[in-house]
Image (cartoon, rainbow, N blue to C red):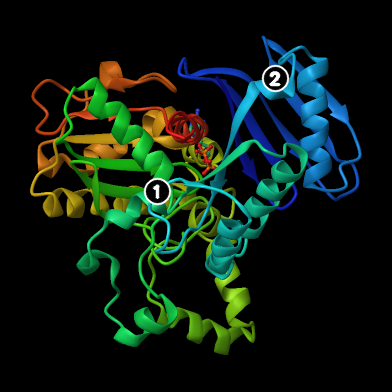
Amino acid sequence: MKIISINAGSSSLKFNLFELPEKKSIASGLFEKIGMEGSFYTIKYNGDKIRKEHELKDHSVAVECLMNELIELGIVSSLDEIEGVGHRILHGGAEFSAPVVLDEDVVKRISKYNELGPLHNPANLLGVEAFMKELPGVLNVGVFDTAFHQSMDMDHFLYPVPYEWYEKYGVRKYGFHGTSHRFVYGEISSYLKRDDLKVITCHIGNGASITAIDAGKVVDTSMGFTPLAGVMMGTRSGDIDPSIIEYMVKKTGKTVGEITNDLNKKSGYLGVTGISSDSRDIEDAMAEGNERALLAQKMYIQKITNYIAMYNNMLNGADVIVLTAGIGENSSLTREQIIEGIASLGVKLDKSKNDFRGEFRCISTEDSTIPVYVVPTNEELMIAEDTYNIKLNK
Ligand code: ADP
């Protein structure tokens, strides 16, 4: 069965067409600069890649264009072959704790959470609307970044603030990257053939979050009400003293929104180094002895290892630690430093196993108290599989 997985941004649309249950990606690509000058798209299939400039007025035009290409390139012989469309949706509030079949009413309910995810949710829904228009009658499923974390207990998701903030305004921890944490948790559970594992999953990419999972249930996660919370990231600060915001508003004359934007877009690796948000650039600068890059990396490792140690305590001893996403899968250096940073837990790296990129592998020694695995994430496949499972049960 062919299922397409979609991640729509405000001016982009990323797709991956899968054959399921074989988990095989048949074609993938990206439509960029939608609604802007110079829009174009790239499609990869069968070892080939095409790139075309094309006016993409809106997301519907992009979807129409994608469908034409799928036929013209011989990737599908008829659009009827596409039996489901899975959409990545950032925020489902406290209402959506699992993937959901999308219709107009459900889309309306999801749009209530747009103010909790103003950069992503409205854009994600543009993708849904475009598919509803261009492929009428085909199953659309929404898969939320927040959903997996809905299994958290209240003592973990509530902030110690006036209770009515939660009751009246929904101020609580939601957590993000849930699809990725759920995917790698599923991978390690099936690899180790256990469904009762206590796992600390570390999604360390440009955005980063750490999650403590006990037998499939999220105990706690580092991102919060928004993705700004938790560990230091490429451009986000992670946890800081909230009083800094008012102080900086007074000092700089900027608005709260502008300071919050600085915390989201100009902080983290980028803010501390002034060089880049990309860990490869930081590693290059470190190799040249750049002081601020060395400082930023020290801070980065501290924040991550503090969360791992805290979650190990919360889980009363984790069975496995999983590293994933761009940095977790590819940076031998950051992996090594993270494991050095939790040496007090008895975790030990086998250096001879750590020099690789993007593979499923155990990188700890036999006598490490907690085994550490690198597990490549695949949110697109997870979204397609969720859609496939709903289609089978319909
Ligand atoms: P996003 O959160 O945007 O999905 P990714 O998971 O793709 O992010 O991660 C992007 C990060 O992964 C960047 O900081 C990038 O430098 C890092 N990364 C990718 N490949 C490597 C590598 N070979 N070595 C070090 N870091 C890498």
Give the position of the N terminus as an image quadrant: top right
Extreme residue in the bottom direction: 250
- Could you say which is closer to the camera, residue 21 or residue 156? 21
Q: Position of residue 327 (x, y in %)?
A: 44, 36
Secondary structure, mark 1, is loop
Can residue 266 be seen by looking at this rendering?
no
Type of the residue with mark 2: Lys
Q: Looking at the picture, does residue 124 appear above or below residue 204? A: below
Residue visible at 70% across and 41% down in the picture: 13
Type of the residue with mark 1: Ala
Instruction: Say which residue label 1 marks.
Output: 98
Q: Quadrant of residue 215?
A: top left
Q: Quadrant of residue 270?
A: bottom right
Residue visible at 47% across and 58% down in the picture: 92
Mark drawn on residue 44: 2
Mark drawn on residue 239: none
Residue visible at 49% across and 57% down in the picture: 268
- Could you say which is closer to the camera, residue 226 or residue 169? 169
Instruction: Name which of mark 1 and mark 2 comes first in the sequence.
Output: 2
Of the two numbered discs 1 and 2 in the rendering, the one whose residue sits closer to the viewer: 1
- Could you say which is closer to the camera, residue 130 or residue 120? 130
How far apart marks 1 and 2 lie (CA) works out to: 30 Å
Mark 2 lies within 8 Å of ligand 1 (Cβ measured)? no
